[in-house]
Amino acid sequence: MIKELIDGVGIDNYLKESLFEIHTKGPVSASTFEKLAYIKKFHEEKFKPFENKFLSSIGLFYKSEKPKSVLETFYSIYSESIVDETGHSFTATQASAFREINNNKYFSFSAPTSSGKSYLFRELIKSTENDILIIVPSRALIAEYYNEVLDIVDNETLVLQFIDNINTEKSKRRVFIVTPERGSEVLKYRDIFNIDLILLDEAQISEEELRGMTFDALVRRVDRAYPNAKKVFAHPFINNPEAQLKKHNFKDDSQSKNYNLYTAGKIFIEIDKNKNFKYFSPNVKTQPVSLDKDIVEKTIRKGGSLLVYISKSKIYEGRHLIDFGKYIELCPFLTDPSAKFLISKLKEFVGASDKPKNDKYSLLIDLMSRGIVIHHGSMPLKARLMAEEFIRRGHARICFATSTLVQGINMPFDLVWIDNFNNMQAITLKNLIGRSGRTSHNKGIFDYGYTIVKSENVETFTKRFKDLVNIEEVSKLDLDIKDIDVDQRDLAESIKNDTFDEDLHLPESQIERIKDSKLDKEIKYILDNLIVDNKPLTGVQYYELKESVRRKIKSNFKIIYSKHLRRPKLNKAEASVLSAAIPIMLWHIQGKSFSEIVSLRYNFICQKDEQRKVFSRLKRKEITADEAKEIINAIKVRYSPVASQIPNTKLRGAPLFKDHESVSEVDYDLVIYDTYDYLDKVISLSMSDPISAALEIYFDSTKDARAIHLQNYLRYGTNDDIEIWLIRYGFSFEDISWIKEHVYKISAEKIEFKDSLTQCSAEQKEMLSRYI
């Protein structure tokens, strides 16, 4: 088949048959779209007369040009009828989903990437009169939604990346964009908010072992709290979207649809051990056909882009530099001022250097200077967002990414190279394929892209490409309590019994355990030794405390955290993670920036105190430079466990660096990634709620205001009222530093600014325009 298409055998018939098939059956055949991609690539002059006909019959009306045939005229009339009916310039798929959402209270659908889901959601958000709740799986996707929503709503719409009741005097409606973990906070305002629409994007998160239960719990609780709101579940490549409705017993006023449709062509390429490229097909049995050139090299030389799906371990070990070194060398150093500005911002944020001989050398920064981006879940969120902005602005030539880039983030590439097949699910594979040649907005252009896999993975790739992806019809919440992980049982029971405390963010059973543990002595000790004049000790003051006092502060935090659990104690690996998290938490409470925290942890792991002693001896000429180097190379890294979310009974500890590793070999990037995981997965997601709850319970019984001050430092990183309010309004610490001086008064109702605001730049005024 491939050779015939390349040679042009029978392509006139292929084109006519494919057009007839799409017109009569719809764009449902992957094989057809593969054939069309080959014809467009190798015989564009023959494809051109059919191009607009295909775009029309696929239903991509926004891409089709002025009709030049009866068929195109028919679809043009159909497109106009959709506008008349819905008031929106929708594709056929978008129009169908829009009707179902309007006609039903519950709608669950599946559609592939490039199906126009983002545009559909934009139009829904614009046309919804009252409040909207959007649930997404990752903070990176929150940021993407946030920027898009800000572009389409007026200044009287409050858009927040968390849930709060603020700016009430100036806001006519609200749009909240949050992860499932924070979505439940909307329940505190069930008598205040008027939610009309709940969008649950990437709803296949319900299948994840730990987060799936949190997601399902949120679905049931918001349905009880906001029974009249429309609930829309969106998934990519799910065969049975109706399962989402069955598991929650949403029978009445409900509908589901599987839009298994294609919009762009795909060409598949294998690469063998000798680095030879060949076309292959996962759709039909056919002989591979060799390429005469290295398509990756050709694409990069022409200014195209490559996405490499790779394991995090390969990135950590630097193997991507060896495997893809040839293509990295093709990427020249960037000269664009916009690219250099983003790189300098990222360098400052992580406190790194791009100079190889520097102590804090960062390969992440060094590679970006050549348009090579790293993207994975352990990168700090702010760094990921900068990397995504870098890609969107067209600066990236190569991106090495794990599955974090697959979760709905809209960044297409010319080539997708799937290097990692370990534990890859079919849905991840289909999402990755969708990243290549995503449908553009170019009029009259049928888009196609390339997917590359190693020859030894072709069989696995083909099987997973054809696999149907089904989600469970029974929620994890409805399993027998014995079949639920011990650390999730409290949540499951609290949902069934409606005993989840919205204010403290914990099941009531866990709150009772904290109360019964009588933690007053442990909390008082922490407050007596950590809080002075309502502020936490500085880093210098903290290390001036006796070692025994510091040890007891950490020990008491461990005790406080552990008391909310259903089991008597943490396992060894969990306890090790908790121990490593506490100094990081204390640095966070002391107001250290991310780069400062990374630097402090790097110094600890590298035993900088010991290294300084060696350098002092060198300065005093007690040893030679070669002897100093030998002594430092002999100093071994301190043990630190890899960050992991707790509690987790299955956790088995792993060291961040090998015990025998020299401090001179420590990778600064790994310290950046792992420190972010501690701040995010361990402190924010695991520790913050139970410790905050214990502090609030202590305050209720003792009225010791220091407990609330410490709680504020833990939650917000500050105890300053204006700063806390500005954080609640959604501003970052970087922006708060200049906004604060212009604030006259701030409350839940509004922000009142001083006259000095007139001195701000146009960019600063624009940032505040919604609140003026």
Image (spheres, rainbow, N blue to C red):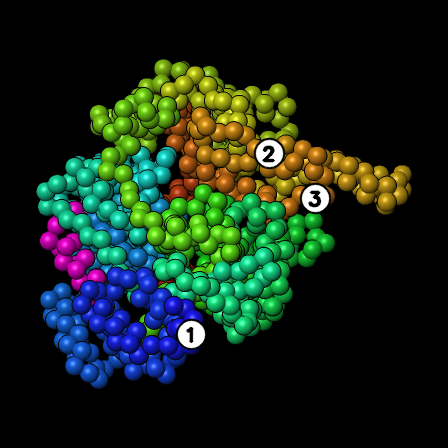
**Cα–Cα gap, marks 2 and 1:** 52 Å
Q: Where is residue 22 in the image (x, y as percent from the top left)?
A: 23, 68
What residue is disc 3 on?
665
- Inspect the image, locate mark 2, and give the three-letter code of the amino acid beneath it: Pro
Task: Give the mark nearest the N terminus, 3 or 1.
Answer: 1
Q: Which amino acid does label 1 sit on?
A: Ile
CA gap between label 3 and label 2 equals 15 Å
- Reply yes or no: does residue 95 show up in magenta: yes
Q: What stretch is highlighted in magenta?
A: 90-107
Is the C-beta separation of discs 2 and 1 under 8 Å?
no
> For the image shown, how many numbered marks are present on the structure?
3
Per the image, label 1 sits on a secondary structure element best described as: helix
Residue drawn at (68%, 36%), measured in percent from left and top?
A: 637
Left or right: where 66 falls relative to 694: left
Disc 3 packing (10 Å; few <14; some 14–19; many ≥20): few
The percent position of residue 384, horizontal first and vertical second, equals: 48, 53
- Looking at the rendered structure, the secondary structure element under dot 2 is loop
Q: Position of residue 367 (x, y in %)?
A: 60, 59
In front: mark 3 or mark 1? 1
The quarter of the picture where residue 632 lies is top right
For the residues labelled 3 and 1, the Cα–Cα distance comes to 51 Å
Please report the residue visible at 60 percent of the width from the left and 34 percent of the height from the top.
655
Asked if residue 626 can be seen in this view, the reply is: yes
Question: What residue is disc 1 on?
Answer: 6
Residue appearing at x 41%, y 68% in the figure? 2
Q: Mark 2 points at which residue?
A: 655
Question: Dot 2: few (<14), some (14–19), or many (≥20) neighbours within 10 Å?
Answer: few
SS assignment at label 3: helix
- Image location of residue 391, percent across then percent down: 47, 63
